[in-house]
Image (cartoon, grey):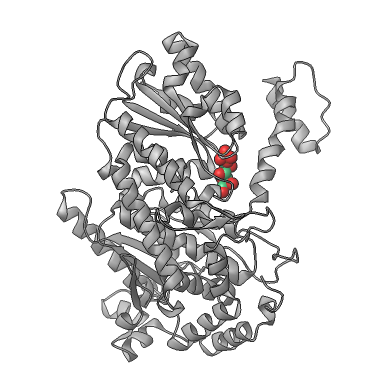
């Protein structure tokens, strides 16, 4: 953030919003809609093939004007250009943040340290495409000459959630002859389940790790190698059954994977932003290079929309500003992501990492503590399942939980009745949350007086509705980029670094000492607190 930008809570725009909030205390969605029959139209926008209706939010045209002014005052425009231009905006790691370069067109030029990175991006995409085609076409064979039928992607966090979520989301587009599985947890139960019933002769492992030093991934990869060598009886089989995706050639080689079978990416790709890099290889094998390219085109369409569209009509910026309105001016601590699409079953988990790892920060770029709330808790489950579980709290609980409803106009199956019912539920839920049911309405339906309050719904519970025509690869790419840029925008306004993750790094070293103590032959000298010492001792006794 440049020196001339004031601290957030000292911006006049920040204070103007606080005063505006005080004037809006009595705002009612019922009234706002009653007073303006054009509200839904006015507060809906389209971009990159996505439709966003944000009319069911506790805001007026004035709120939006003030929020946009805040974004301008925080230098969002310049920060967007800095990110797309390859500036080292990840200041604590001294890195550029260029996931947008992963989906840049072949003829684009984006420089990092004076070098255009786009040719390298496309060279890797081409290699991935050739490899995926060989596996899908049966030209890449296993050690014994068998066709590959199973692909197991090993990775964790940013090297797992993206492809796992997207494979699930795009399963309607995947090759039915290829079964793709994911292993992430160091809990052996995960590996055992993923490899259960698999024939090593027809199984390909894709080991995904940016650093190639992550304990979980390397432990699973070693177990996989042992499983394979035991099954096929020859170390040489590894060459035909293992490929790697990493930035760390030396570690890949020392693991025993031929660098010729390594797909590269770069330090300027953050883990949680890496699906469109080679980390998406398992997805590309499943859906094919062409479909993968369509997904990249969806990402790119949203990148362009984000970069080129005025903030008032800019989908990621609007989502970000609305989120700030609730987090910083209404005390909302969480936000729910509710995809009414079973294929998006892992989308909330994916966004949880994207958002919480990016904006779960307590200091500003200069290291000073923030004096305002930053990233929310992100959670959610697909509808309609959630309705039979936690929606009670959304409707009648004491907490404000802004919701994002996500749906597709066309289903990805041949059961239209199901789809009508699914979408009817989506629309009904956002309607009920916004408008509730007054006590008088309850009474007039003949409910006994003592139950009236229990059956009253206050309404005024805000939501966005995001619709895609169909959950295609293009739509998924645009949807992911929508949230990536939303998170970025919020990080800019809060003045934090959305691109480091020291908390995750801490987790990577913490367990090392205790692992040695758990495994030590002789009784270790335990010097933790009394609780941790006792837990370790108890585990060792068994
Ligand atoms: C993502 C995080 C984290 C990371 C994993 C895996 O942004 O940094 O989730 O992706 O810890 O790291 P490796 O890819 O290095 O194994």
**Left/right of residue 235 with respect to residue 91 in the rendered view:** left
Please determine whether, in this image, residue 154 is positioned above or below residue 471: above
Name the residue located 41 percent from the left edge and 43 percent from the top edge: 125
In front: 36, or 306?
306
Residue 456 shows in this picture: no
Residue 172: which quarter of the image? top left
Residue 36: which quarter of the image? bottom left
Position of residue 293 measured from the top left corner of the image (x, y, whole percent) = 33, 49
Image quadrant, ligand 1: top right
Please determine whether, in this image, residue 76 is positioned above or below residue 405: below
Name the residue located 62 percent from the left edge and 33 percent from the top edge: 213
**Left/right of residue 81 with respect to residue 53 in the rendered view:** right
Please determine whether, in this image, residue 438 is positioned above or below residue 288: below
In front: 513, or 333?
513
Hey, which residue is sitting farthest top in the picture? 233
Name the residue located 58 percent from the left edge and 63 percent from the top edge: 375
Quarter the N terminus occupies: bottom right
Please state the total of marks drawn on the protein image: 0
Position of residue 472 measured from the top left corner of the image (x, y, whole percent) = 28, 53
Residue 214: which quarter of the image? top right
Position of residue 67 measured from the top left corner of the image (x, y, whole percent) = 52, 81
Position of residue 450 measured from the top left corner of the image (x, y, whole percent) = 39, 73
Quarter the C terminus occupies: top right
Residue 176 shows in this picture: yes
Please determine whether, in this image, residue 42 is positioned above or below residue 168: below
């Amino acid at each position: 953030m440049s020196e001339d930008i004031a601290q957030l809570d000292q911006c006049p725009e920040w204070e103007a919003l606080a005063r505006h909030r005080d004037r809006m205390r009595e705002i009612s969605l019922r009234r706002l809609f009653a007073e303006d029959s054009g509200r839904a139209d006015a507060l809906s926008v389209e971009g990159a093939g996505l439709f966003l209706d944000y009319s069911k939010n506790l805001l007026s045209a004035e709120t939006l004007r003030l929020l946009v002014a805040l974004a301008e005052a925080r230098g969002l425009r310049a920060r967007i250009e800095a990110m797309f231009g390859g500036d080292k905006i990840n200041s604590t790691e001294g890195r550029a943040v260029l996931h947008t370069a992963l989906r840049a067109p072949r003829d684009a030029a984006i420089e990092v340290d004076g070098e255009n990175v786009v040719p390298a991006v496309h060279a890797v995409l081409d290699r991935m495409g050739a490899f995926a085609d060989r596996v899908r076409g049966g030209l890449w064979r296993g050690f014994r000459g068998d066709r590959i039928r199973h692909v197991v992607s090993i990775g964790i966090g940013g090297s797992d959630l993206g492809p796992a979520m997207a494979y699930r989301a795009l399963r309607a587009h995947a090759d039915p002859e290829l079964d793709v599985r994911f292993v992430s947890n160091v809990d052996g139960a995960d590996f055992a389940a993923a490899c259960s019933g698999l024939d090593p002769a027809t199984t390909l492992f894709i080991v995904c790790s940016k650093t190639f030093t992550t304990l979980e991934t390397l432990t699973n990869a070693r177990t996989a190698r042992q499983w394979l060598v035991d099954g096929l009886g020859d170390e040489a089989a590894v060459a035909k059954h293992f490929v790697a995706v990493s930035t760390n050639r030396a570690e890949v080689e020392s693991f025993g994977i031929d660098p010729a079978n390594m797909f590269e990416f770069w330090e300027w790709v953050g883990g949680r932003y890496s699906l469109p890099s080679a980390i998406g290889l398992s997805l590309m094998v499943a859906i094919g290079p062409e479909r993968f390219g369509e997904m990249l085109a969806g990402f790119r369409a949203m990148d362009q929309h984000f970069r080129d569209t005025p903030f008032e009509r800019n989908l990621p910026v609007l989502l970000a500003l609305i989120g700030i309105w609730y987090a910083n001016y209404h005390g909302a601590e969480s936000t729910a992501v509710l995809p009414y699409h079973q294929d998006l079953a892992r989308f909330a988990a994916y966004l949880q990492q994207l958002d919480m790892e990016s904006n779960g920060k307590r200091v500003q770029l200069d290291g000073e503590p923030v004096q305002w709330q930053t990233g929310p808790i992100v959670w959610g489950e697909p509808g309609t399942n959630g309705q039979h579980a936690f929606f009670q709290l959304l409707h009648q609980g004491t907490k404000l939980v802004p919701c994002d409803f996500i749906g597709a106009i066309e289903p990805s199956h041949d059961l239209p009745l199901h789809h009508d019912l699914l979408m009817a539920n989506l629309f009904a839920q956002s309607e009920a949350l916004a408008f509730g049911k007054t006590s008088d309405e309850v009474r007039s339906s003949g409910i006994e007086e003592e139950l009236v309050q229990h059956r009253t719904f206050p309404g005024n519970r805000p939501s966005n509705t995001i619709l895609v025509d169909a959950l295609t690869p293009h739509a998924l790419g645009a949807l992911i980029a929508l949230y990536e840029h939303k998170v970025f925008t919020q990080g800019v306004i809060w003045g934090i670094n959305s691109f480091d993750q020291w908390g995750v790094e801490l987790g990577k070293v913490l367990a090392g000492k205790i692992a040695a103590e758990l495994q030590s032959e002789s009784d270790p000298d335990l010097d933790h607190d009394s609780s941790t010492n006792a837990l370790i001792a108890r585990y060792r006794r068994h």
